[in-house]
Amino acid sequence: MARSTESLAIVFAGLSGSDRLYQSLGDARAREVVTRCLEFMSECIAEGEGIVIKTIGDEIMCTFPSAERAVEAAVAMQEGMDRERPGSDADVAIRIGLHYGVAILEAGDVYGDVVNVAARMAGIAKGGQIITTQETAESLSPALKSITRHLDRLSIKGKSELIDIFEVVWQPANVTRIATKLIRPSSQELCLRLRYRGRELALDQSSGTIVLGRGKKADLIVNDRMASREHARIEFRRDKFVLIDQSTNGTYVVTADGPLYLRGEEATLTGEGQISFGRSLSETEEVVSFSCGS
């Protein structure tokens, strides 16, 4: 199939906290719940004239001919999950990220910057949220644009400028929540220092997103076979540094407040601490130390 380009809305919709389902319900029941939820999301996508490109674990990647259709389908998914509870007795929520732009189509798949940005929006979204970009929000009809709210301004790897992030407020009650959630930037310049095997890496609010992992493309390469190639990333969000796990085996963090295990989750890095990849600090010497201060 020949390569072509087309303006499309790219949507990533996935289950939030599905790992905990397997722990609480057992493999068979959890798999049933995940399958039922994915089928429900696929139905919403088809009804909104979308096309499912692929299913990646508990996440669906799909395309829509317009941002309008994508947002309408995303709202339908969230409302349906909230109303019909296809997960039955399980505590299930979905997180959705989307972006509209020019995509490269080839062999039944889609590529390009629009896909990367949409995936990044999905990585920011929490359960029950729909996250998009200002560029996408501004392309919506007045009716849909009116239910979007500015959420934050973030740096994204590969982008030289900060990106304005918007949330689609599909529940009216969420307006108040967003208004109180906005983060005011600190007047102090914060710096995060990472130390690993004699190397030190310093981050500030202009550093953008950095990746930690085993792969050669990582900004800080960790020599641990349990680490994923792009195991985790760290980004500056207004007045804090946030560690986001995107690995198979999870990320371990130890601070003065105690140990923390992340898998598909994120945590704010404050004070001093240590990070290990895929196994606890007691099981490996491949540990990254960090300190955060002004």
Image (cartoon, grey):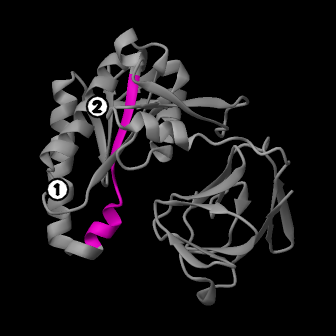
Magenta-colored span = 9-22
The residue at the point 81 percent across, 49 percent down is 204
Q: Where in the figure is residue 24, as x and y percent of width and height?
A: 25, 74
**What residue would you read off at disc 1?**
87
Magenta stretch: includes residue 150? no
Q: Do the residues under discs 2 and 1 have CB atoms within 8 angstroms?
A: no
Kindly state the secondary structure of the residue where label 1 is placed: loop
Q: Is residue 112 above or below residue 122?
A: above
Q: Where in the figure is residue 115, as x and y percent of width and height?
A: 47, 32
Sequence-wise first label, 2 or 1: 2
Extreme residue toward the bottom, this view:
282
The residue at the point 63 percent across, 30 percent down is 163
Q: Where in the figure is residue 154, as x and y percent of width and height?
A: 64, 37
Q: Residues within 10 Å of mark 1 (few under 14, many from 20)?
A: some
Given residues 58 and 126, the one toward you in this image is 126
**Which quadrant would the C terminus be assigned to in this image?**
bottom right
**Residue 74 as seen in the image, left or right of residue 83:** right
Given residues 41 and 277, the one toward you in this image is 41
Q: Amino acid at mark 1?
A: Gly
Q: Is residue 131 above or below residue 137?
A: below
Q: Is residue 238 above or below residue 1?
A: below
Q: Is residue 257 above or below residue 228?
A: below
The disc at residue 75 is 2
Q: Amino acid at mark 2?
A: Val
Kindly state the secondary structure of the residue where label 2 is placed: helix
Q: Is residue 112 visible?
A: no
**Which quadrant would the N terminus be assigned to in this image?**
top left
Q: Where in the figure is residue 98, as x and y percent of width and height?
A: 42, 31
**Residue 266 as seen in the image, left or right of residue 194:** left
The residue at the point 85 percent across, 48 percent down is 188
Report, in whole angstroms, how far the alpha carbon at label 2 lies from the one at label 1.
18 Å
Given residues 121 and 62, the one toward you in this image is 121
